[in-house]
Amino acid sequence: MRYDLKGEANMPPIVGILYSAVKENSQRLQRITNDMSQEEVDYKGPNNNYNSIAQLLKHIMYVDLNWVYRIKGLPLPQSLQVQYGPMIDENNKLPMIKGMSLNTLISKYEGILTMLRDSCTQLTDADLDKVVTFGHGNEKQATICWGLWHIADHSRYHQAQIHQLRRWYNENSQSN
């Protein structure tokens, strides 16, 4: 298989390349989570003290959803905050999630990626220089260009954690 970052046909060149990086990483995330049992999706690592794959997937979704709305120049609607959030719980940790199927998580994630794709089709390459505010309690500024790159990078970062959880889960399953 040959890999390349080629822009999407219906997007300006730079926007398309950045979106392509997000798309490739989302496809990779779906491949590495394929065929997980509910027990594995909810597994929290040795001693039950890590974020589960479900928590990580929901976190990725919420971050991406926030960026979609920043790109649109709109606040995230309260209904979506309730449905996908919060970013962190009252203990500054990823919110607990248990029992949500992998199919449901991936389906919701695909819906957010569709919103992102639709938003990217409305962008020009010049729009990538627009500055938006992000952060939760620690406000920062970044360009839309950086935001699109961050979506791809953030997904890859958590994919490494998912790989580790899968290793631990398989080791734990074999020893039982």
Image (cartoon, rainbow, N blue to C red):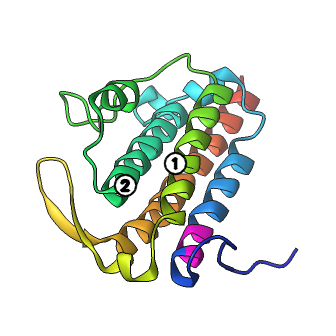
Q: Is residue 87 left or right of residue 6?
A: left
Along the line of sight, which residue is nearer the eye, 167 or 26? 26
Hey, which residue is sitting farthest right in the picture? 1
In the rendered image, which quarter contains the N terminus?
A: bottom right
Q: Is residue 3 left or right of residue 48?
A: right
Identify residue type, mark 1: Met
Along the line of sight, which residue is nearer the eye, 121 or 21? 121
Relative vertical location of residue 23 with respect to residue 104 in this rendering, above or below: below
Q: Could you tell me how many numbered marks the image carries? A: 2
Q: Which residues are magenta?
A: 16-21
Residue 20 located within the stretch drawn in magenta: yes
Label 1 SS: helix
Residue ID at (65%, 29%): 102
Q: Position of residue 142 (x, y in %)?
A: 25, 71
Foreground label between 1 and 2: 1
Q: Position of residue 172 (x, y in %)?
A: 66, 31
Along the line of sight, which residue is nearer the eye, 124 or 43? 124
**Residue at image mark 2:** 67
Hey, which residue is sitting farthest top in the picture? 99
Along the line of sight, which residue is nearer the eye, 161 or 115? 115
